Amino acid sequence: MPGTGKLHASEAEADALVTIRFNKRRWLLLLGTLGPGILASSAGNDAGGIATYATAGARYGYGLLWALLLITVALAMIQEMATRMGAVTGKGLSSLIRERFGLRATVFAMGCLLVANVATTLADFAGVAAAAELFGVPRWVAVPLAGVGLWWLVARGSFARVERTFMALALVFLTYVAAAFLARPDWTEVLRSLVVPRVPATPPGLAFRDHLQGYLLVLIATIGTTITPWMQFFLQATVVDKGVTIRQYGFARFDAFFGAFTADLVSFFIIVATASALFYPEMLPHPLEDAAAAASALVPVAGPHAGWLFGAGLLGASLLAASVVPLATAYAVCEAFGFEAGLGKDFRRAPVFLGLYTLLIGVGACVAMWPGLPLLAVMLVAQDINGILLPVILVYMLGLVNDRRLMGPHVNGVVYNAVVWGMVILVSLLTATMVVTSFWPV
Amino acid sequence: MIFLSQYLNRPVRGVAGARLGVLRDVTFTEDGDFPVLTGLVVSRGRRRVVVPWSDVDRCTLDTFVLRGTGPWPEVAGVDRLLALDVMDSQVVDIDGAHVVRVNDLQLAWQGTRLRVVGVDIGPWGLARRLGWAPALAWVSRTLRWQPPEGLIRWDTVEPVDKQTSTVRLRVSSDRLARLHPADLADIVAELGHEQRSHVLERLDDAQLADIMEEASPELQSAILDNLDEDRAADVLEEMEPDEAADLLSELSEDRARDLIGRMDAEDASDVRNLLAYQEGTVGALMTTSYLEIPASWTVGRALDWVRREGADDELCSYLYAVDEAGILTGVLSFRHLVLATADAPVTGLFPDHLVTVGVLEPARAALEKLFHYNLLAVPVTREDGRLLGVVGILDALALVHEPEED
């Protein structure tokens, strides 16, 4: 009989086989949806993150652990918000801001994001410089090399494989977990610091104002490096790219929470390890001078090779963030203003996209190779800038996520709004205090 | 050229020059290819009123001049507002085949009416609205660089509603239908979920199936989530069986079984059978949509049959001849069929050497045969020689060119 071809296998036979082809796939589905949250959170542990957590541990011991716990809860909720917005609307954060709040508000949001991300990129090139110096390579050799290399990799579009190498290098920071345990800290003390908020007393010989400002600087930086503005744009864009819809939302929500908690677990161990190695309560709080000091916390694990181990991790984390942050910025801005964007497009087709990417890498690399630039201070201040600008982005996000026309039944609940608004108010108050106290007479 | 942004947030005046309020928006209605403005939304103190077009006397370089002083009605929910609903929204640029964002709207006079004639998607539109146009002009002069103009005609765009809009723009699906399915798939990928379902609603099952075949797995599953289950099953029926099977294998088992259950029996059994082959085998790669004739036919009868039935099939580079038991006995290229006389039996055209690939062999075997024998498609058989499907060169090439992970 003529006609299009037909198969004649028995259905029972077919059914048995179908099960096999599906079961393999279900894991892939799980892995496909898992990921954005974890990637976003772990990219938060970049050079600036390491510098901030190490500084927190070295200066204040366990004195910031309570803040880290609260920040983690807020981070989990904020990441979940970004994921939920991506899954419900299928649109990026910039797109939503533009459509909901109009052009002027978008320009303001993008301006804030740009400032924060220039600072972050600079911090990451400072991380490259610091890592290079641990290996005895001068920064004016390593930084331009890294800048040109990253730019070229992305412009050529062969970024994916290298990204994985950087991520693998950044896994070095897991050794902080071992370092924390080997340092034999007083765990009951650690746990108490985690749940009981305490502001360390003013040490003798230091004016209260200076003590307060120093503490606020590190506290805001800790918030800013853990919950970064760029991460929310990046996360939502990734959720949209993966085609996650509210139907498969269970996985994505798990990913957002899981990512927040695992990333901050690493941060927790970094603080504990550096506190055990470098914090002496009887001494004046001292700034962490350089990367070698931060690396010394790894001595219990790596012995004399601590510097090299730390350097490798710092290099990987810095390079990863130094390429992802400019890329995320360029995507977010182009999405907001409707400019052509995409890897593998040339300057003629996507001038703004490549221009922004080049600008961020250029500025970051040029400033970071400046001789005598205090690298750790730069990394810390960059996180402060992120922290100070975070409330702006959070207010936009809250406006969007509570809009029923956008989110339908998936708007925020009371607890979410309370926590995230709490974060907005807290950071704004901390910033205001820092500004006001700087006018106090000593 | 007149742009909406020139007038927004500027005072409107009476005939005598008195300031009557500030222009906040304009109302419009669809009328032919270019929407026509029907009124001005003016804020007077705390109220926002709609001044009908009949009360607009004229418009100067930066202001509208109104006749009379009202009273005018307040803005109602049904009014379509150009600035609120269209500015900053996305539109599909049909000629450029991509999604762009509206930075400004170009207006033009037709008699005594103003119409929306174009969409500004370029940097000039942004600069004009932010009041940075002089700065952009300066940059352009100093760098001797001409920013792209970015103006597209209104009748070559397809508006996409903002998610926050309460009114839906009238849209004509025939503009979208002018696009190649591959371009349309790219466009659908760029839209949000709600806009996507607005666009998808307006396409028929066959168009949707074409898009699905061009789409990435992520987009396929997102589109499928947008459709209700019966429509999803209809679209799967329209797709080539191998594409439909690949798509179903990406879903959860329960969902896939449910969708297969809703498909009509014949398509469902095709898909179910294809799903039975494991990933990486020839069976999972092949399609069951090909041309098959009895080996006893003549050339004339075969050609006749192809003219009537052969339009829809994916692979029609060859005809496959089978005996009564479904065993493949020969392959006919159209060149040979056309060159032969009508009353010759098709068996006379069979090649001496029949190239086939086994259904359970690894998928690469099909690719190697295609390259080695320079074929456009290779038939797939069971051990006993029964014809089960065909692997075309394009499907096989996907093995060589695995999409790069990102």
Image (tube, coloured by chain):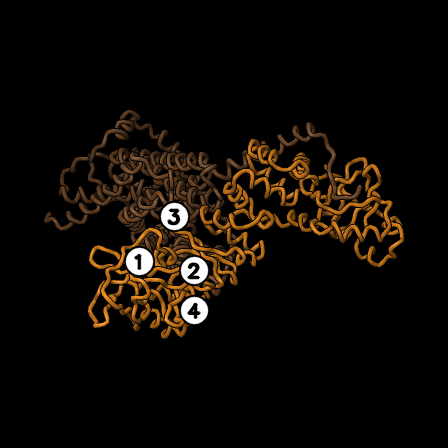
Chain colours: A brown, B orange
Q: Residue at x 62, y 34 (%)?
A: A21
Q: Residues within 10 Å of mark 1 (few under 14, many from 20)?
A: few
Identify which amino acid the numbered label 4 is placed on: Glu
Q: Residues within 10 Å of mark 2 (few under 14, many from 20)?
A: some
Residue A310, percent from left and from top:
39, 42
- Viewer-proximal residue among B53 and B240: B53
Which residue was labeled with disc 1?
A104
Which residue was labeled with disc 4?
B149
Image quarter hosting the N terminus of chain B: bottom left
Q: Is residue A273 above or below residue A354?
A: above
Q: CA distance from mark 1 to mark 3?
A: 19 Å
Q: CA distance from mark 2 to mark 4?
A: 26 Å
Q: Nearer the viewer, mark 3 or mark 4?
A: 4
Which residue was labeled with disc 3?
A233
Q: Earlier in the sequence, mark 1 or mark 3?
A: 1
Residue most extreme to the top? A188
Identify which amino acid the numbered label 1 is placed on: Arg
- Whether callout 1 and callout 2 share a subunit is answered no
Residue B30: image tag:
2
Residue B306, percent from left and from top:
77, 51
Q: Earlier in the sequence, mark 2 or mark 4?
A: 2
Identify which amino acid the numbered label 3 is placed on: Phe
- Whether callout 1 and callout 4 share a subunit is answered no
